[in-house]
Amino acid sequence: MPNAPVPLDRIDSAILRELARDGRLPVAELARRVGLSKTPTQARVKRLEEAGVIQGYRAVLSPIRMGLAHVAFVEVRLTDTREAALQAFNHAARALPEVEECHMIAGGFDYLLKVRTADIADYRRVMAEHISTLPHVASTSTYVAMEAVKEDAFSG
């Protein structure tokens, strides 16, 4: 099964924790931190990459330093929840750069969006010109974040 969970032992978990903190960590240092030699550490990292547990490496950017300090969470209710409508909404939401996350929800609304903009005026523009015009949107409710207490679940 391609999406089945991959069994992870204590060493695999330690490797993942260290790489989540610093994806540029040299293998020798990673090996030292997890208590293995370099060759078995490299083999484990390769296995985790091939299994899709490690999907890639990237730079961690500071949205605040980039002028994107305003975060809003938006509940979205759709007029139609048949598969074609969901796919149309999904496709359009993925195309909006301000939508940092988009989750389909089982509950009193259909989607929860995390929207990042420069400020409330920019958010208002994005809401009016883009989010409200997404396919099949019936209504939205916005919640503005005052402070991010924790954002990265895997870096510790």
Image: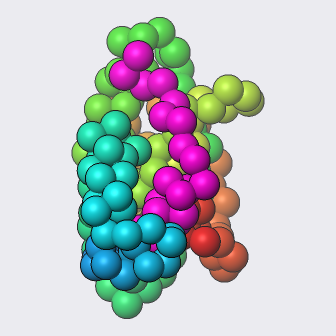
Classify 5 as above or below 9. above
Residue furthest to the bottom in view is 65
For the C terminus, the image quarter is bottom right
For the N terminus, the image quarter is top left
| Residue 7: % across, % down | 53, 36
Q: Nearer the viewer, residue 25 or 61?
A: 25
Is residue 16 something one can see in this rendering?
yes
| Residue 132: % across, % down | 43, 43
| Residue 92: % across, % down | 30, 36
Classify 80 as above or below 151. above
Q: Residue at x 53, y 58 (%)?
A: 11
Q: Residue at x 51, y 31 (%)?
A: 5
Classify 102 as above or below 121. above
Classify 83 as above or below 134. above
| Residue 145: % across, % down | 65, 70
Magenta region includes residue 80: no
Residues in magenta, as a range = 1-19
- Res 109 → quadrant: top right
Q: Residue at x 73, y 28 (%)?
A: 107
Label tally: 0
The image's colouring method is: rainbow
2 with respect to 58 (left or right): right
Q: Residue at x 49, y 78 (%)?
A: 33
Is residue 60 something one can see in this rendering?
no
